[in-house]
Image: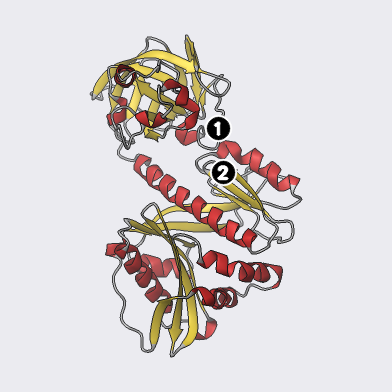
Amino acid sequence: MVEVAAVSEIEAPLGVGRVVQVSVSPGGVPKQPVPAARVGRLGLEGDAQAHRGVHGGPHRAVCLLASEAIGRVAADGHPIVPGSVGENLTTEGVELAHLEPGTRLRFDGGLVLEVSAPANPCDTIRGSFSDGKSGRISVLRFPSDSRVYARVLTEGAVATGEGFSVLPALPETSAALHVLLERLEKHEVRFWQATWGAVAAGGADLRLLELGDAFACAAPSLPGTIFNRAFGLRMVPNLRQVIAEHFRANGVAGWLVDVEPPAPGVEPLEQVSVLAIEPQRVPPTPELPGLTIRRVRADEATVWESVLLDAFDIQGPERKAWLAAAPHIAALPGMQCLLAEVGGRPAAAAGLYGRARIGGLIPAAVLPEFRGRGIHTALIADRARRAEALAFDLVTSQAEQAGSSERNLLRMGFARLHARGLYRAPA
C-alpha cells in the first residue's frame, strides 16, 4: 500500500457523498459498470485509455463526475449517463467540480484521492451530447459540470455504494504547483512543436511524434540531445516506452525530459530549474551605456541566430540546421527575436515565445567579449516588459541549476518551481 500522507481520524469532513457507479473499459467510451475495482497509483485495475497522450498517468489516475452534473446536462437533452463520458467514479452528494485542487476524498474502504485538476473534454465523448459538442462539460463554459481528475494518495479498493468524505487539502500539498507546472509544460510542448517544425521547414530530417501532451523528435542526421528528445512526460509517463520505441525505430539515442529515471541509480545528464514570475514583478535594470535591445527584422533572422550559435559555440551540422531554420523561427506566431547591440555591434540574442498568456524566455546568449556587463539581466527585464504589454500573466524560463543564468533569474525575482532531469531513453 502506498501511503503519501497519514489521514487523521478526527478530521471533520467538509462534506460527504456516495459512489453511484464504478466504471472501467479497455479504452474508449462508454466505460462499463463494475461492482468494485482496485485503485493503484496509475488508476483502476482493468481500466485503460484510448488516448494515452491526454489521459492517464499519476496526475490523472482517476476521473470523477458528479451525478448532479449528469442530471443538469441530461436535462438539456443530452444522452449522457454514468460512465458515458469516461469517468471512473460517478458520485452523488458532492459538487465535485467545485472542489479546489488538493482537496481530498477519503473513501470508507481506505482509498484516499486528491483532486488534481479539471478534466478537459475531447471529441471521444461526443456521443454523449445531442449536438456532438463535448464542450457542454468544459470547466471554462460550465464550471459546475466538469469532470475532475485525481491523484492516488492511498491505494485501495472502491465499490459501488461506498461512502466518502471530503477533506481539506494537506498543508504540504503540491496540487496547486502541479496545476501550474502542467500549464507551463503545455506551453513548452507548443514551443518545441513550433521550433522543430521550423527546423524541418529549413530542410532538416526530423522525425516528429505528437502524442497529445507529449512530443518527441528523432533526428538521425543530427546526433545529440537537442534534436533527439521528448517533452511532456511528467504528465504522461505511461508513454515512455512508446517514445523510446520511436527513438529505436529511427536509430538514434533519445533523451527524456522530466521523467522518472529509467533504472535505479541512473543519474540525469543534466538538471534544469523551471522558473516563473508575473511579468509586472520583474524590476527594471539600470541603463547600460551604448546598449540597445530591439526586435529583429525578417531579413535579420540569420544574424540573430548566428549570435546565439556563436555564444553557445555550436558548430557542424547542428549549426547549419539552425541557420537554415532561422527565417522560419522568426516567422512563428507568438515569437519575438531580440538582438542586443552595444555601440551598434551585436552583443547578445534572446527570444520571447508567447502562447496562452505565457511568455517563454528563450535562452539569452551573450557573446564572450560582452559578458559580465549586465546584458543578460537587461534582456530578462526587456522581455518581461514586452510580456506585460501583451497582458501575459506569467513569464517562464529554464536554466541550468546553480548556473549564472539561474542566478540572474533568481535575483530578478523569479521563483524556482521545479527541478527536472534529462535521462537517456531505455535502449
Q: Nearer the viewer, residue 371 or 404?
A: 371
Res 124 visible? yes
- State the residue in front, 311 or 175: 311
**Amino acid type indicated by mark 1:** His
The first of marks 1 and 2 along the sequence is 1
Q: Does residue 260 sit above or below 156 in this rendering?
A: below
Q: Residue at x 67, y 44 (%)?
A: 244
Figure quadrant of residue 81: top left
Residue 77 in percent (x, y) is at 34, 18
Crowd tier of the residue under label 2, counting other residues whose Cα lies within 10 Å: few below 14, some 14–19, many 20 or above: some
Seen in the picture, residue 122 relative to 343 is either above or below; the reply is above
Q: Residue at x 57, y 75 (%)?
A: 302
Relative image position of residue 117 (x, y in whole percent): 38, 36
- Callout in the foreground (1, 2): 1
Name the image colouring. secondary structure
The answer to whether one can see residue 226 in this image is no
Q: Element at badge 1?
A: loop
Which mark is on residue 5?
none
In this view, 106 is above or below 142? above
Q: Secondary structure at mark 2?
A: loop
Number of other residues with Cα within 10 Å of mark 1, as a class: few under 14, some 14 to 19, many 20 or more: few
Label 2: which residue? 260
Quadrant including the C terminus:
top right
Between 53 and 156, the residue placed more toward the observer is 53
Estimate the x, y position of residue 193 in percent, counting from the top left.
55, 53
Residue 312 sits in quarter? bottom right
Name the quadrant containing residue 159. Answer: top left
Cα gap from disc 1 to disc 2, whole angstroms? 21 Å
Q: Residue at x 38, y 30 (%)?
A: 148
Residue 212 rendering spot, x and y as whole percentages: 53, 41
The residue type indicated by label 2 comes to Glu
Question: Which residue is the site of mark 1?
Answer: 51
